[in-house]
Image: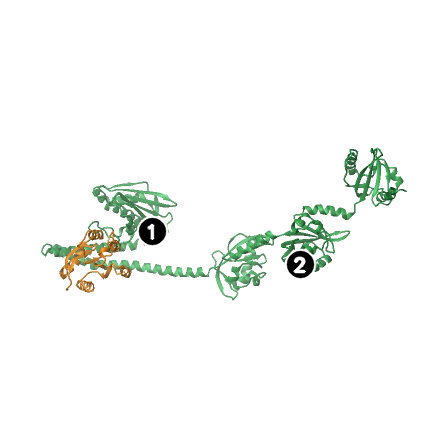
Chain colours: A orange, B green
Amino acid sequence: VSARLGLVMLIDDDEADNYYHRMVIERSGCADEIRCFQRAERALDFLDAAGERRPDLILLDINMPAMNGWDFLDAYRDLAEFREDVVVVMLTTSLNPDDRARARTIDAVADFKIKPLDDAALTEILAAHFS
Amino acid sequence: MGDGDRIADCAVDSIIAFGLAGDITFTNPAASDLLGYSAAELAAMTYDQLLPGDGLAPFAAVREQILFEEQVEPIQTARIGKSGERVTVSVQYSPIRDDSGRIVGVSSVMRRLSQPQRVADRAQALLETAPDAMVIVNQHGQIVLVNAQTEAMFGYAKSALIGRDVELLIPEGAVGNHREHRARYMRQPRARNMGQGMELLGRKADGSTFPVEISLSPLHTEEGVFVSAAIRDITERKKAELKFRALLDGAPDAMVIVGESGAIHLVNAQTENIFGYRKDELIGQPVEMLIPERFRGRHTGHRDDYFSFPVSRPMGAGLELAGRHKTGSEFPVEISLSPLDTEEGMLVSAAIRDITDRKRAERALAAYNDRLESKNRELQQFAYIASHDLQEPLRTVTNFVGLLESDYRGQLDEHADKCLGFISQAATRMSHLITGLLEYSRIGQNQDAVDIDCNELLQNVVDDLSSMITATSAELVAGDLPAIRGYRTELRQLLQNLVTNAIKFRCEGKAPRIEITAERLAGDWLFSVADNGIGIASEHLERIFVIFQRLHTRSEYEGTGIGLAHVKKIVELHGGRIWAESKPGHGTIFYFTIAGELP
């Protein structure tokens, strides 16, 4: 993997998933920094205050308590400055084709992947959006 | 002989003069003719001897008037002739004065009133009391008598009508026929309605026409046969009829109006559409032509029964009724009957609805329902098998992770411990989810509704949760709860879930307080469970009832996200609905209803 990313954000309420995805990314050595958020609201707060530390990649779960992935995208859309150069990939267990179709209608979403994120999936994301 | 005497001798009118004492002083030949007495006989009589008993009082009054020098109008009265016969006369009394102007006597000029004149007068009085325009014509069709209503109805003055042909009152187009009809009627006159079943029109002075109804009766007199026509303006009734027809044609159902003989009197436009016949093919025909042949025999019997006990009701309740189209095809119908009391006697109106579409929809619905039921059974079976078969490999995972954890914890690195922890937690959670799912699918299955005392039910729940309640110093306040009909296990689960939630989502450092009430709400029961916990943001108030939806991460609050989905399904099983109101930081109130009659 040749691409190098700065900050990667993992937004998922499942601690185990976050732990696993962080491990996969760490082992690939493609990112300088990985931050995990179990609540989408916290991720939004972080982005709001990020300033120069904007992420290169956001991996976003759909089913989360309180603010779910869709709610997050609604709020994220209001943070217009991030939209251009931040790659948002939806990462979900959802097998519901409606979710995939819905994701396609949202500009900010660059990709839609099924969990778990493994080496192959990560390679695909890097190849598609960072080369 | 002076001119005056000659005039008196030749006058047609009878003249008798008498003195103030009543002694007759003068008579003319016409008076002798009228009364049968000779001039000499009369000269020896007093005037009141010529009066009938009932004529004395009016005569006295008139005489008084004359003496008081009042003007006197001619009056109708009677005289008694020599043979004792009563003669009807019109009399004009006048005073006789001497040269000085003193009244010395009275003259009476009498004219015999002819029979027809008297009949006419009486007839006129009678005519004026009639509500209809009355027109009496002679055998030549000339109008001889009309009443005031005739003047008002046709816009002619009486004088403009008397002597004219009655055809003056008839629209020109109908005049020719009318003359023929009139001639025929005169040959065989009897009381009847004119032009039965036909639309008759009258013609006003201004040429406009209007619908009328006319009844004729012959008047036999010495002068020959007269015909009296009672004419009624039925403009208003026609309007009402038109309105009725418009109403009929506007009805969504076929309306068929039938007489006691079973003949069709009236149908609306919808009848043509549904049965394929034109109106004129139906009117007068037996109503059985709209019924499949195999039912016709029985129908006439039913029809007779209905006419003997006519009340508004659906026809053949519970039976499958069929109509017969002109082409012979049959279609399912629904019919309601009502009696119509009309001038034509008792009629029955049948409102016929083609329910082909509804039947088709019903069949489709029944088929759909069957499919749904079998799917439901399948699904329940599936959930049961799935949960059973899923639990087994899961147990293997749980067992062996447990073994690894107890045998190797601390001997591997921190990362390995963490991984084992995740596996063990996930397996436990999966087990809970599977159990929850199974329970969810089983709500309301294989149970009978029973009468439940909710106070007792809540006490059971409190007993079950006693350790949790003690540990959190929770306070439970309940009003007097009702006895309701429902499913015991489910209702207990419902209360338990709501109370558990109220305690679980308590505010930190504040003892949970839960208040449960119930009240009657339009035949149903409205329950409320209020807490003083952390509350729910308004945008999440709907989502909380969806299965597996959670508002908190598992590290904040444990749970599968099934509890409120369970609660919702239980409430719906009891024909109720559930919703929540909340103020974040202050508490939540869950409201749910339980139907008075279970679905």
Residue B177 placement, left or right of B589? right
Disc 1 marks which residue?
Answer: B572
Q: Which residue is mark 2?
A: B172
Q: Choose between B582 and A51: the one closer to the eye.
A: A51
Q: Position of residue B50 (x, y in %)?
A: 83, 39
Compared with A4, B43 (above or below) is above
Neighbor class of circle 1 (other Cα within 10 Å; few <14, some 14-19, many 20+) is some
Chain of the residue that carries numbered disc 2 in the rendered image: B
User: Percent from the top left, x then y, of residue B475?
Assistant: 25, 41
Q: Residues within 10 Å of mark 2 (few under 14, many from 20)?
A: few
x and y, in percent, of residue B10 in the image? 86, 45
Front disc: 2 or 1: 2
Are both tags, 2 and 1, on one chain? yes
Residue B100, disc? none
Residue at 69 percent of width and 60 percent of height: B176
Q: Would residue B306 be visible to someone looking at this image?
A: no
Q: Is residue B111 left or right of residue A23?
A: right
Residue positioned most to the right: B1
Q: CA distance from mark 2 to mark 1?
A: 78 Å
Q: Are marks 2 and 1 in contact (CB under 8 Å)?
A: no
Can the viewer see residue B19 in this picture?
yes
Residue B56 placement: quadrant: top right
Q: Amino acid at mark 1?
A: Glu
The secondary element bearing badge 2 is classed as helix
